């Protein structure tokens, strides 16, 4: 299991029992996602439930991974990045390698988001200039900028 804290489920009322088995419906409800989404994550090999006939049985480990998957998605990581980060725990059970990689990738995402924010601020400022110029031109022509004529 990952070393860092797991994502908070949508409605976490279930006790943390490492031996507990969960159904697809239980986890879907707990995390506020669909069973189809969970099957997709299984197809992408992000979670690997046991099977009993056609029934999927999810462990506490699967539950934790699901929390990480959803948190990673909220943060903007791709599913491939999430899988790589989760799989690092299998390589280094101390979690150090996983945490270092998470730190590195988080810094990259922060840098990218800061660049996007600067770009958005520049666009907003340019539109404000256009707004000011157009408003002034309409007033100069004797037209109410807010009117519908």
Image (cartoon, helix red, strand yellow):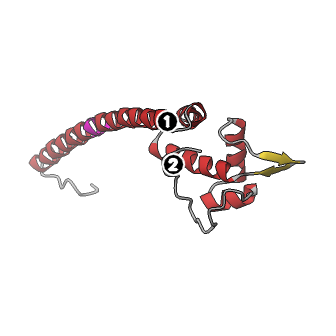
| Quarter-of-image position of residue 14 | bottom right
**Residue 138 among magenta residues:** no
Mark number, residue 98: 1
Magenta residues, dominant SS class:
helix
Percent across and percent down for residue 146 are 23, 57
SS at mark 2?
A: helix
Q: Residue at x 45, y 38 (%)?
A: 99
| Extreme residue toward the front, this view | 94
Q: Is residue 120 left or right of residue 72?
A: left
Within 10 Å of the Cα at label 2, are there few (<14), some (14-19), or many (20+) other Cα atoms?
Answer: some
Percent across and percent down for residue 22 are 73, 58
Q: Residue at x 67, y 35 (%)?
A: 44
Whichever of labels 1 and 2 marks the residue nearer the N terminus, that label is 2
Q: Residue at x 71, y 57 (%)?
A: 19
Q: Is residue 94 left or right of residue 42?
A: left
Q: Which range of residues does the magenta coloring cover?
A: 116-120
């Amino acid at each position: 299991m990952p070393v860092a804290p797991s994502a908070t489920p949508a409605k976490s009322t279930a006790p943390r029992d490492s031996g507990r088995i969960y159904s697809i419906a239980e986890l879907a409800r707990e995390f506020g996602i669909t069973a189809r989404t969970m099957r997709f994550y299984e197809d992408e090999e992000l979670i690997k439930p046991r099977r009993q006939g056609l029934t999927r049985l999810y462990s506490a480990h699967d539950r934790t991974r699901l929390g990480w998957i959803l948190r990673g998605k909220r943060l903007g990581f791709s599913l491939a990045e999430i899988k790589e980060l989760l799989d690092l725990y299998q390589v280094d059970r101390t979690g150090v390698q996983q945490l270092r990689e998470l730190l590195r990738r988080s810094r990259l995402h922060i840098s990218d988001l800061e660049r996007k924010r600067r770009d958005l601020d520049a666009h907003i400022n340019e539109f404000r200039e256009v707004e000011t110029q157009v408003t002034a031109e309409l007033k100069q022509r004797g037209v109410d900028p807010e009117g519908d004529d």
